[in-house]
Amino acid sequence: MSKKTTAFKIRDILFITMMILPILAGILLKVLFIPASDGISITGAHVFFTIDFPIQPLIISEAQVNSWLVIISLFFFCLFMTNGIKAGIHTKRQVLAEWMVESVENLVKSNMGEYFIGFAPFVAAIMALSAFSSLLSLTGLFPPTSDLNIVAGWALLVFFLITYYKMKCGPLHYLKSFGEPVPFLAPLNIISEVATPVSMAFRHYGNILSGSVISVLVASALQGLTHLLMGKLPGWLGEFPFLRIGIPAVLSIYFDVFSGLLQAFIFAMLTMLYIGGAFALEDYLAIQAKKKKTRTKINT
Amino acid sequence: MLELAIGIILGGCALGAGCAMIAGIGPGIGEGNAVAKACEAIGRQPESRSAVTTTMLMGCAVAETTGLYALVIAILLIFVAPGRFVEILLNAIK
């Protein structure tokens, strides 16, 4: 084991503080700027301010701010994991970081094939961003994934990638794919093309939002139940919601932790499957080979 | 008269949201079938457990889509639509 230098330790402390600081900043923003509710009202993301634009004003909401906080936190988490990384020396942290990278690469290789290995960082980024955005609700902040705009942005990115890989064999090949079984089914094919990002966005958003709505409903129901049972007790004892302690946490394990992580995994898997399925590798290689042949013919 | 109109709007939105969630039946049956078949497959070949589980979760997520469309419509009807409709009504009266 190599001795830890002071520079290494200082960098460690800096990265850890920078990981925690965005979350604290989010909590501070929430405390300062968002009016408190009694825990029963279900509202969307709080709008901090709007910027005037010609077509439509740009809204800076809680979801966007929290999403950026998660991005900053994850950035410093990555720096922390790769701090002091060296070939050969295996600290616990390095083994963990290598396991993460290798497992994502294996996942991409088994689902998309060897050609798409460059997609591993993208898939890992989407998975981590989605998972940590959903887990942000454990700190009491608004989870960005329960806002449709954030998830729709990711789905749109995936849609552009799908279209790019379909276009890669040539625009004619792409247009021909719409009249695939019979030409008059083209409208249905266009609809199913558009439905891909819509269904991806709605799936992620609906799962997270339904969890939070059910949690709030159960919490308010438990408050009513305590009021019914212990409302006759004198003073603060009668108003304190005893049943709200602990019981909603059991639901939170399913809806926040399990459902959030599962949706992150499913979003990443669907990204891989759609992009991998959009690209006809054999056709592309055949076209490339043909091009090469004609080029060599012209040269000779 | 205005109260009656707003009451009809709120009642209609709530009824519509309730009717929309009938769509929850479909994904329930579909996912139940998927999980039952996955259990059978794992029982037959216990060593293929991880692959079957991953595929089942993917299939469940895709089968859930129709239910989630209904859920999104119900949420819009409950939280967004009443305000919009009442606003339209008040503007029309003006």
Image (cartoon, rainbow, N blue to C red):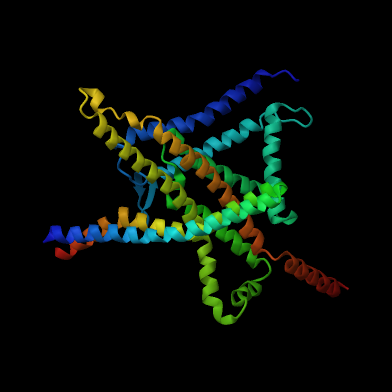
Observer-nearest of A72 and A196: A196
- Can residue B58 be seen here? The reply is no
Looking at the picture, does residue A5 appear above or below residue B36? above
Percent from the top left, x then y, of residue A268? 59, 50
Going 55% across and 46% down the picture, which residue do you hit?
A262
Percent from the top left, x then y, of residue A72? 52, 37
Seen from this angle, which residue lies furthest left?
B1
Percent from the top left, x then y, of residue A109? 72, 51
Going 40% across and 56% down the picture, which residue do you hit?
B72
Left/right placement of residue B56 relative to residue A42 reads: right
- Can residue A132 be seen here? The reply is yes
Tell me the quarter of the image containing the N terminus of chain B. Answer: bottom left
Looking at the picture, does residue B74 appear above or below residue A74? below
Left/right placement of residue A299 relative to residue A59 reads: right
Observer-nearest of A61 and A236: A236
Going 46% across and 50% down the picture, which residue do you hit?
A207
Going 46% across and 32% down the picture, which residue do you hit?
A23
Residue A270's quadrant in the figure? bottom right
Looking at the picture, does residue A191 appear above or below residue A62? below
